[in-house]
Image (tube, grey):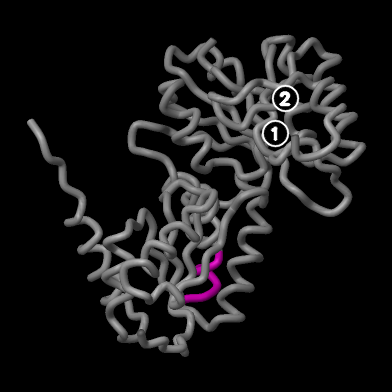
Amino acid sequence: MTNLESTRTIRAVIAGHGTFASGIISAVEQITGRGDQFLAISNTGLCLDDIQHVLAQALDETGATAIFTDLPAGSCTMAVRRLVRARPGVVLATGINLSFLLDFAMRDDSVTLTAVQRAMESGRTSMVVHGD
Amino acid sequence: MPVELYRIDDRLIHGQVVVGWGQPLELRFIVLVDDEVAASDWEQELYRMGVPPHMTVHFHSVADAVAALPAYQADTLPGLLLTADIDTMIQLVASADGSIRTVNVGGVHHSPGRTARLRYVFLTAAEEAGLRVIASLGVAVTAQDVPGARPIPLEELLQTADGA
């Protein structure tokens, strides 16, 4: 068994309700071993100003230029929208799912709007209803 | 009563409001009462982007909301009124001629000087006194973040030591 020590940098911050972020990152890690590209932030117990502060700190400390959130109306999304107003280079994607994050994780290119849009398309097409 | 819920929530419009309460109450409008938001087109657009198409958001300063409240209460569609802080709700209740009978404490989060009462309610002594003022005006004040949670009466809330 090969044990490759990770040297990856954080490419994106994942922010959401409860343990959404840590949970979806753990799924990426289990499937691809690439969960260490992401940093998880939870809004639990935080007011809007604190969420914004924590997210800004996460971007500053990691150098990430993308934030992915769970719910368009969620407090994390609201906080990020305020944040990106002052940081034009930061990309926000909201309503993400596992297919979205897997697509993003498996591509080693830099964080560009195109990469995020491509991941979003993958996330959208992964949602399928079966049955009559 | 078309305004189904009068809620204090420092996150204002967010998931619990739009989905958690919005779907079971079949909300069609939100009245957001906040002087800062009422003065900013950008903030208003931010909050409008957070609600589904069938939901309308009305923005008011505290002073304007007092005058507008009867029309919202007479609306035939279900709505929710939001304030970010306790002081704003006190002003509304005091001016509403008894038409606000219940107030929901949905989220007052941690900040310096506040004591933990619930995982989503942290209060300063002044804020505790503010909630008592609302109750003294004949209003049933309860803490409840989501519809499925038990509404916690004010007296019980203020006796809760931390994170219960």
Q: Of the residues shown, which amino acid type is indicated by label 1?
A: Val
- Residue B59: image x %, image y %? 56, 37
- Residue A122: image x %, image y %? 21, 63
Subunit bearing disc 1: B
SS class, disc 2: helix
Kindly report the distance in space between the C-alpha atoms of the residues bearing marks 2 and 1.
7 Å
Q: Nearer the viewer, residue A108 or A80?
A: A108
Q: Nearer the viewer, residue A11 or B130?
A: A11
Residue to which mark 2 is pinned: B92
Tell me, for residue A26, which label it has, or none: none
| Residue A89 visible in rendering | no
| Residue B23 lies in quadrant | top left
SS class, disc 1: helix
Q: Quadrant of the C terminus of chain A?
A: top left
Most extreme residue toward the front is A1
A63 horizontally vs B154: left or right: left
| Residue A12 lies in quadrant | bottom left
As drawn, A52 above or below B46: below
Based on the picture, tell me whether residue A93 belongs to the magenta stretch.
no
Q: How many marks?
A: 2
- Residue B162: image x %, image y %? 81, 39
Tell me, for residue B62, which label it has, or none: 1
Q: Residues within 10 Å of mark 1 (few under 14, many from 20)?
A: many
Q: Which residue is drawn at the image coordinates 43% and 17% (left, top)?
A: B77
Subunit bearing disc 2: B
Q: Of the residues shown, which amino acid type is indicated by label 2?
A: Leu
Image: magenta residue range:
A83-89
Q: Nearer the viewer, residue B67 or A80?
A: A80
B93 horizontally vs B22: left or right: right
Disc 2 and disc 1 in contact, CB within 8 angstroms: yes
As drawn, B133 above or below B17: above
